[in-house]
Image (cartoon, grey):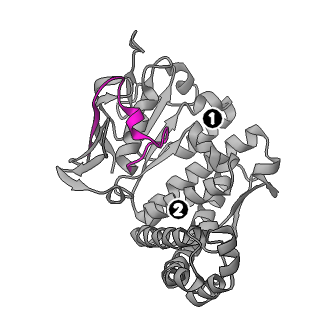
Amino acid sequence: MPIQKIEMINFRNHQKKVVTFSPGINLLWGENGSGKTSILEAVYILSSGKSFKTNRLTETINNKKKETIINGVFGGKTTTFYQPAGGQKKIKINNVIKKTKDLIGKNPTVLVSPEEEKITKGPHTERRKYFNRLFSTVSQTYLTNLIKYTNAVKNRNHLLKQNKQPFEVKVWDAPVAKYGSLLWLEKKHLQHSFNREVFLVCEKYNNNINIDISTTTPKNPTEKDLFEKLNLNIQKDRLLRRTLVGPHTDQYTIVFKNKPLREYGSQGEHKLSFVLLKVAEHGFIKKEANKNPTLLLDDLFAKLDNDRGNAIFDLIRKSGQTIITNTDLVGVEAHGINTNNPNNKTIHLLRSWKN
């Protein structure tokens, strides 16, 4: 569901700011420090309950203020995020208190920002987190099983760290095996669907580009097999004091032109692969969840040459609501974005002398 309006109070450098959006392309432009990325961050928080800039949401509170509030209108319904300086965040939808998990998949966004580039450049844990987040966006079943699995592994690891006896640790083997195998089974289907979307995006962009994603997820996972592996690994788990088998150890390798991207990719290949994966993410969510996510593009075109920028824009031209940040209008117009189109909207942000 497109976002229609957002209000930010004491959020980052916005003491009180209201922005209305078009269902088409929205261009936030202004010099560095004017708060463009902060608006993307606020939209992202209302979509996911988390920030892409920090793990500590209290850091989003404007200097010396007691709280920050974000209100966003999606399809006539108001989502509110409240973060006090000395307490827990609160989330409401139409004034009804909700949990973070209630936001996931409701009003999805696809974020293209420097912070997300760790998907291709970072360790396996970053790609694992990315796919867990993505698959949770399109499947409530996946999200529910992930929460239950994570809780079971956490409890099992707690006993391992306390050096408890095997019979005590094994109490958690059954739930770890049950929810772990369910995750693997659904992940197998969703991964295949995502890889297919990546193939289609690469084909549209350039026939000579190929990106593949391989994973260590078992081909035919069963609850029985995982249960037996947990049993066989108990002594090793006790020695290292953590659970060593299960979906939380899955590894993902992105292969670009038949070579592992993380080890052999150039800066340009990393950037191109990252953007193409994000375009595929948009199509994947649209297909699997039957929802058109809002694209959040943070200074994207400043990081791409004209040819690549034009080709990428051709891929996202009909993606629905898109919010783009840039320091000026000239840069985006060079890539074919018509700022005079009535379906598009430009929003000029000025930097406060206080920032």
Proximity of marks 2 and 1: CB atoms separated by less than 8 Å: no
Q: Is residue 102 left or right of residue 97?
A: right
Q: Residue at x 32, y 43 (%)?
A: 3
Q: Quadrant of residue 103?
A: bottom left
Report x, y in % for residue 249: 64, 67
Let me know if residue 61 is in the magenta part: yes
Label 1 packing within 10 angstroms: few (<14), some (14-19), many (20+):
some
Q: Secondary structure at mark 2?
A: helix
* Residue at far bottom of view: 224
Going by the image, does 262 lie left or right of 70? right
Kindly identify the residue that appears in the image at 61 percent across and 52 percent down. 277
Is 272 inside the magenta-drawn segment? no
Residue 132 has which mark?
2
Give the residue type that dot 2 points to. Asn
State the image quarter where residue 309 is shown.
top right
Q: Residue at x 43, y 19 (%)?
A: 34
Residue 125 picture location, percent across and down: 63, 56
Q: Which residue is mark 1?
A: 309
Percent of width and height locating residue 61 = 35, 31
Left or right side of 96 for 325? right
Residue 99 rendering spot, x and y as whole percentages: 30, 57
Sequence order check, earlier mark of 2 and 1:
2
Write down the region rendered in magenta: 49-73
Q: Nearer the viewer, residue 29 or 23?
A: 29
Badge 2 density bin: few <14, some 14–19, many ≥20, Cα 10 Å = some
- In the rendered image, is residue 205 in sight? no
Secondary structure of the residue carrying numbered label 1: helix
Residue at the extreme left: 95
Q: Quadrant of residue 25?
A: top left
- Residue type, numbered disc 1: Gly
